[in-house]
Image: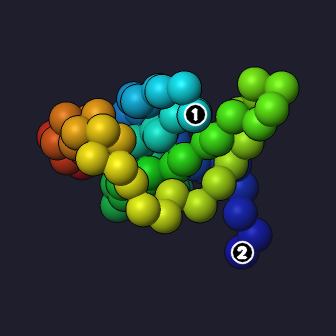
Amino acid sequence: MPYDASLDKEMFSKSHENDDGKITVSVHSYNNGPKKLQIVRENRDPEGALRFAKLGRMTKEETQGVLPFIQEAITNM
């Protein structure tokens, strides 16, 4: 069965932004399945537009910024 975007429901989403880009913490449910946590990094390119990047390692500032969002996301799961 191919992926169907209309079946993917976002239950929660909050972002931590800094000069380099943003990290978004969200909770999704696909086809009324179990709710799952997703963490996405977007970096700014030289023109200032956001582009998807691997999350990889986070700085202490980034971790402190997203940790409250992760804890809040857990209450929405």
| Residue 13, x across and y down, in percent | 42, 32
Label 1: which residue? 21
* Residue 34, quarter of the rendered image: bottom left
Q: How many marks?
A: 2
Q: Is residue 75 left or right of residue 77?
A: left
Label 1 vs label 2: CA separation?
Answer: 34 Å
Question: Is 47 situated above or below 8?
Answer: above
Q: Is residue 13 left or right of residue 65?
A: right
Image quarter (top left, top right, bottom left or bottom right) of the N terminus: bottom right
Which is more toward the observer, 39 or 6?
39
Of badges 1 and 2, nearer the viewer stands 1
Label 2: which residue? 1
| Residue 43, x across and y down, in percent | 64, 41
Inspect the image, locate mark 2, and give the three-letter code of the amino acid beneath it: Met
Where disc 2 sits, the SS reads loop
Residue shown at the point (54%, 26%) measured from the top left: 19
Residue shown at the point (30%, 39%) measured from the top left: 61
* Residue 34 visible in this rendered orientation of the protein: yes
- Judged from this view, the residue extending furthest toward the bottom is 1
Which is more toward the observer, 69 or 11?
69
Q: Is residue 40 left or right of residue 7?
A: left
Inspect the image, locate mark 1, and give the three-letter code of the amino acid beneath it: Gly
Question: Is 64 situated above or below 28?
Answer: above
